[in-house]
Image (cartoon, rainbow, N blue to C red):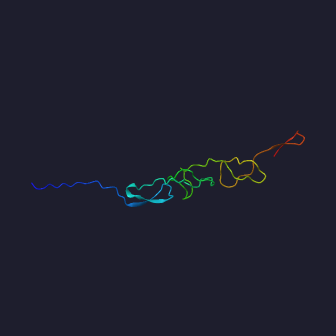
Amino acid sequence: FGPVFETKKLPCPPCTSPVPVACLGQHEIADWPCHEAKPASCGRKCGRILACTNHTCERECHRVRHAADEVSAGINCKKCDKGCLKPRPTNCQHACNQPCHPGECGDCDVTLKLKCHCGLNNKFV
């Protein structure tokens, strides 16, 4: 008999060529080794504009789903849960009773009960 040759497939080492990968929220692009190249969170705040148009998404970098454009929040962004903090119309000291909202506040709808100087009659304004 002569020499016996055997062909074996050896495992290929992980590819280390740099590949550009965008983070989940598309905030930045970084080079990753090819064998580790997959989108991940960059750690920044999402920052997309919420429906109230006054605040931004506070979630850590995440894949945004069903956003209208590149700056608007998607359906999986954190919703605004703040009350309205906008300045009130002239001559109104009452807080707006709406949740945080886009645009201006409506007219004051608080009814005040005022007593007449004699103390007998009430007037609602």
What residue is shown at x 13% (from left), y 56% (from top)?
3
When asked about the image quadrant of residue 114, the answer is top right
Q: Quadrant of the N terminus?
A: bottom left
When asked about the image quadrant of residue 103, the answer is bottom right
What residue is shown at x 64% (from left), y 48% (from top)?
82
Residue lying farthest right?
118
Q: Nearer the viewer, residue 2 or 55?
A: 2
Measuring from the top left, give residue 68's x and y in whole percent: 55, 57
Query: How many marks do you count on the picture?
Result: 0
Measuring from the top left, give residue 75's x and y in whole percent: 54, 51
- Left or right of 81, for residue 66: left
Measuring from the top left, give residue 95's x and y in whole percent: 72, 48
- Left or right of 111, for residue 20: left
What residue is shown at x 50% (from left), y 55% (from top)?
25
Q: Nearer the viewer, residue 123 or 96?
A: 96
Residue lying farthest top?
120
